[in-house]
Amino acid sequence: MTAAAAEADGSADRSAAGTDDCADPAAPRRRDAARSRELLIRAAVELFAERGFARTTTREIGERAGVDASLIARYFGGKTQLYLATLQVELGDEVPADLLEEERLRSLLVRLARRGPGPSFQAAVLPEDNTEVQQAGRAYLHERMVRPLHDRFVAEQVDRPGLRAELAVAAFTGIVLARSSGAFEDLAAADPEELLPLLRSLLAATRPA
């Protein structure tokens, strides 16, 4: 092999190696973006639950997530869209069990005791103003709480299934909000396991014997 050929061959090898090393230069950036989105959604879920939507700032979300808060606008469009994204993540594709199922009720009580009620529960009692966030919160409540109970009551051929399902969810929502407000000391102090059988009895009253 001549010197020129060897040099050309070596250049080709180096070029191929460089191609392998940087096969997709955008891949790390995509991974970083996905990680940042995940961190922002996780931080937003926590802060919205702790402080509510209105009192949570994008700066606080960024600080909790450990990323630049300006990425909220880049990845989601703004705080409202980020909140809607958190609802979609929590919603998932699977329809949950209804509130009359013991494990479903227990998991909700434990989760809400740990992080408090989020904007979805607040939306159930706020005056109608047709904001995107409030409407999304109400839609979440109906999808995750009302619909499973409604479907159970329809299957059991219960009279007024929609009304009974909404009544049960309204009672649960009121208890959750009252429990977090501190207005009722015994209710706020009750352990979820202590509250579970009492709440089950209350919700079961919406279903005819």
Image (cartoon, rainbow, N blue to C red):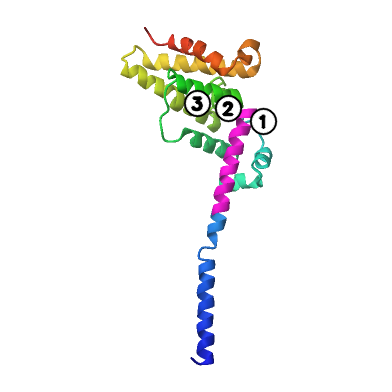
Examine the rendered structure and indicate whether residue 20 appears above or below residue 200. Answer: below
Q: Nearer the viewer, residue 139 or 204?
A: 204
User: x%, y% of residue 77?
Assistant: 57, 44
Q: Nearer the viewer, residue 205 or 131?
A: 205
Q: For the magenta stretch, what is the residue range?
A: 31-52
Q: Nearer the viewer, mark 3 or mark 2?
A: 2
Q: Identify which residue is drawn at 58% across, 34% down.
A: 45
Q: Name the residue under label 1.
A: 55
Query: For the residue carrying disc 1, how many other residues have a C-alpha within 10 Å: few (<14), some (14-19), or many (20+)?
Result: few
Q: Identify which residue is drawn at 41% across, 14% down.
A: 163
Query: For the residue carrying disc 3, how many other residues have a C-alpha within 10 Å: few (<14), some (14-19), or many (20+)?
Result: some
User: x%, y% of residue 15?
Assistant: 52, 76
Residue 90 in sight here: yes
Distance in Å between CA atoms under marks 1 and 3: 19 Å
Q: What secondary structure is found at the residue carrying circle 3?
A: helix
User: Which numbered tag is attached to residue 138?
Assistant: 3
Q: Name the residue under label 2.
A: 118
